[in-house]
């Protein structure tokens, strides 16, 4: 069946959490000059997430980055959208991001 908005948010948050861990490992490997911290799987995960974001619309990128990657304060969107427009875009942004991931 179809995922609810809450379930989609949980799936994306979990994926982005692993992505952020991979980014942290990449930084650690770079700063310590020790690539043991950073695996091929980490590299592929980062590539996949960033490719998915590139393939999404500008609005989707903005929403996914601010809601899930940067975890901005709750009303960050007011600089870009009205509240009703944001909530309308948010659900379609989650759908688009998941579709761009091909999962």
Image (tube, rainbow, N blue to C red):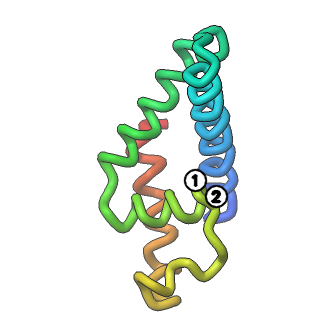
**Place of residue 14 in the rendered image (x, y in percent of width and height, measured from the top left):** 68, 44
Name the residue tied to disc 2: 9
Between 1 and 74, the one nearer to me in the picture: 74
Count of numbered badges drawn on the protein: 2
Which structural element holds mark 2? helix
Look at 51% across and 68% down and name the residue there: 91
- Tell me the mark number nearer the camera, choosing from 2 and 1: 1
**Place of residue 79 in the rendered image (x, y in percent of width and height, measured from the top left):** 45, 84
Distance (Cα) linking label 2 and label 1: 12 Å
Mark sitting on residue 39: none
Rate crowding at label 2 as few (under 14), some (14 to 19) or many (20 or more) other CA atoms within 10 Å: some
Look at 36% across and 38% down and name the residue there: 51
**Place of residue 84 in the rendered image (x, y in percent of width and height, measured from the top left):** 49, 89
Mark sitting on residue 69: 1
Q: Is the residue 48 above or below the residue 15 in the image? A: above
Precedes in sequence: disc 2 or disc 1: 2
Which structural element holds mark 1? helix
**Place of residue 1 in the rendered image (x, y in percent of width and height, measured from the top left):** 59, 51
């Amino acid at each position: 069946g179809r995922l609810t908005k809450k379930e989609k948010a949980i799936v994306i948050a979990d994926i982005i959490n692993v992505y952020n861990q991979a980014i942290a490992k990449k930084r650690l490997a770079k700063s310590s000059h020790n690539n043991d911290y950073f695996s091929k799987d980490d590299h592929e995960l980062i590539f996949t997430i960033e490719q998915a974001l590139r393939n999404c619309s500008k609005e989707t990128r903005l929403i996914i980055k601010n809601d899930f990657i940067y975890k901005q304060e709750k009303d960050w969107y007011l600089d870009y959208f009205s509240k009703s427009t944001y909530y309308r875009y948010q659900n379609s942004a989650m759908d688009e991001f998941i579709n761009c991931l091909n999962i």
